[in-house]
Amino acid sequence: MGKFPTVQTGMMKDKLVTQQRMRTQAGRADDGLGPNTDIGARLRALYGAVQDEGVPDQLLDLLEKLDNAEQQQKSKNAPRDGE
């Protein structure tokens, strides 16, 4: 007789946990993302933060140097009049 309340309590806990999971999954399914709701929200937040950061000056300087080097290379390889 002492084991029955423990077994029933354990079964009730399992049932409550299962019901809670079903409600959670149903709520997540409503937003179209399913179980990936949290992941999707975090990825969107991270992507938005990266977009707002801007490009570092050092990177802009390197890109400008690359553009200049490409222009110089093109002008060296361009056909000259008279050749």
Image (cartoon, grey):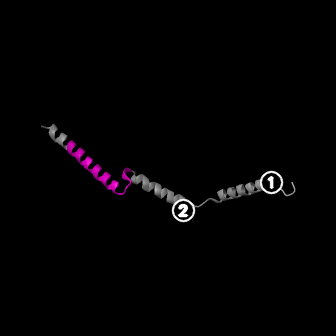
For label 1, the crowd category at 10 Å Cα-Cα, with few meaning under 14, some 14 to 19 and many 20 or more, is few
Q: Quadrant of residue 3?
A: top left
Q: Is residue 23 left or right of residue 33?
A: left
Tell me the CA gap for discs 2 and 1.
39 Å
Residue span colored magenta: 10-35
Mark 1, residue position: 76
Considering the whole magenta stretch, tell me its main secondary structure.
helix
Q: Residue furthest right?
A: 82
Q: Which secondary structure lies at badge 2?
A: helix
Closer to viewer: mark 2 or mark 1:
1
Q: Which secondary structure lies at badge 1?
A: helix
**Residue 64 drawn at (x, y percent):** 70, 58
Q: Is residue 25 magenta?
A: yes
Q: Decide which of 23, 68 is in the foreground and name it.
A: 68
**Residue 72 drawn at (x, y percent):** 77, 56
Q: Quadrant of the C terminus?
A: bottom right
Q: Is residue 29 magenta?
A: yes
Type of amino acid under label 1: Lys
Q: Residue furthest left?
A: 1
Query: Marks 1 and 2: in contact by CB < 8 Å?
Result: no
For the image shown, how many numbered marks are present on the structure? 2
Q: Residue furthest front?
A: 82
**Residue 5 drawn at (x, y percent):** 16, 41
Type of amino acid under label 2: Asp
Q: Decide which of 22, 53 is in the foreground and name it.
A: 22
Q: Is residue 53 left or right of residue 82?
A: left
Q: Earlier in the sequence, mark 2 or mark 1?
A: 2
Q: Decide which of 22, 78 is in the foreground and name it.
A: 78
Mark 2, residue position: 52
